[in-house]
Each structure stands twice: as structure tokens, then as C-alpha cells.
Amino acid sequence: MSGDYGTTFPRLRDAAGEVWQDYTHHAFVEGIRDGSLPRKAFLGYLVQDYIFLIHFSRAWALAVTKADTLDEMRACASSVDVLVNGEISLHVKTCAAEGLSEQELFTAAEHPANLAYTRYVMDAGHSGNFLDLIAALAPCVMGYGEIGARLAADVHADHPYADWINTYAGDDYQQACRNAGVLFDGAVARRLGDSPETTPGWERISQRFTTATRLEVAFWDMGLSFGD
């Protein structure tokens, strides 16, 4: 169950169908929830997610150049700040405790699943418009918010993945999701009008959203493979 992430996100989530459930209730996520995920799989995922977040930050920076209004620019710039100065720090801290430096993270080889996802998002921005890019970014932002909020009920003092869960369940991240929802709703209303689902643009952003969600599933698959 999500918080108040706006009205555009839940409509696109519902349109994505079963793939959204595949993403937010993936075996990797459930392994985090109950603490059974092998540490090797989690650390392999963290290294790749660090690389992913570098590209994700660049994609939000690209959104600044695609924005039509100052408010949109500010919202996208704020997302860059949350990623670069917040979310990435968790990965650095966790990996440092396992003996991995930030330089090792930055220079790690990028997994094909990571390449596919990040380049898809960047292409959405380069070849498409602002809505194309935000639709490709949204599944990660809001999906992690939903996952964090759901998994928070299972956190206890000695939970092995408490820091990860609390990051995405925490007030700061949940507010970032709500802010992204406001941005998305406003961008859709500005560009597609009061009845966006009747426009050709809606089908395009729905496809963007669903494809990015499928790539999230593949990213979790990649994470599980590190535990083999």
C-alpha cells in the first residue's frame, strides 16, 4: 500500500497489471522482508544499485533540462540531491562495513541488467519528452516507497536489513515519493489536460512505466543471481 503518491502513479501502476506485483513482491524483496536473503546476494545488488543510482541521478539531472517550469526544475534538482547526498550514502556505508570502498563501487563492472535498465531510462529522456522520462523514472521511486512502507512492519532490532528497509520506509524517502507524485500529476495535467487517459500521450507514458517496471523485475532477478 502506497502513501499519497498522487493520482497519476496509481493509474499507471494498475495499468501495469501483474508485473507491478512481480516487482514489489519479488523473491528478492521477500528475502529482505524476512531476513532470509543471502548476504552475498544483497551486497552484489548494492554494488549494482550504487552504479544504477549514479545513472539515475544523471537522468533526474536530464529532467531539469526537459522541464517546462521553474517548479519542475526545482523538483527534479531536489531528486538529484536526495539521490547523490542521501540514498547513495546508504550503499557506501553498508559496503564499507564489508570492506568495499566507494572507489571500488564506482569502478565495478556494470551488469547487463543494469545496463538495460539505466540506458532505457536515459533513452526515454533523450529521445522523448519530460513525461516520457518521468514515467520511466517513477516505478523505481514509488515502487521502493511502497516496498519500504510494507516491509517496515517486519523490522525488529536485530533485523539484518533494517537499515535498508528504514531508508525507504522513513519520512524523508516517503516525502520524496509524495513530491514526485505532485510533480508527475502536474506535468501530466500541464501537457495532457484534464482527461489524460483519452490522449495518445497517455498510452505512451503507460508503456514507458510498464517497461521500466519489467526492468525492475529483471534487476531483482540479477540480485538473486549473486547469491548462487
Image: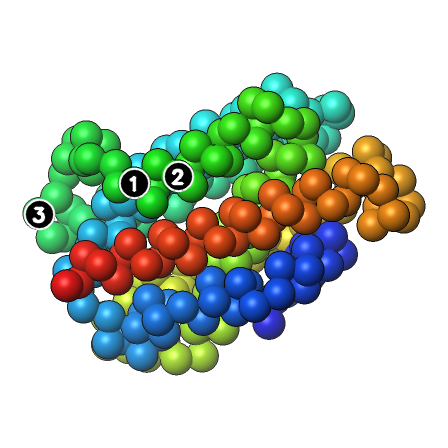
Label 2: how many Cα within 10 Å (few below 14, some 14–19, many 20+) = some
Judging by the rendered image, the residue that carries numbered circle 3 is 99
The Cα atoms of the two marked residues, 2 and 3, are separated by 28 Å
| SS of the residue under disc 3 | loop
Task: Judge left or right: residue 40 versus residue 172.
Answer: left
User: Is residue 104 shown above or below 25?
Assistant: above
- Picture quadrant where residue 124 is located: top right
Label 1: how many Cα within 10 Å (few below 14, some 14–19, many 20+) = few
Label 3: how many Cα within 10 Å (few below 14, some 14–19, many 20+) = few
User: Is residue 159 shown above or below 194?
Assistant: below
Q: Earlier in the sequence, mark 1 or mark 3?
A: 3
Outermost residue to the right: 194
Outermost residue to the left: 99
Q: Residue at x 76, y 44 (%)?
A: 202
Q: Earlier in the sequence, mark 2 or mark 3?
A: 3
The Cα atoms of the two marked residues, 1 and 3, are separated by 25 Å
The answer to whether residue 110 is seen in the rendering is yes
Give the residue type at disc 3.
Gly
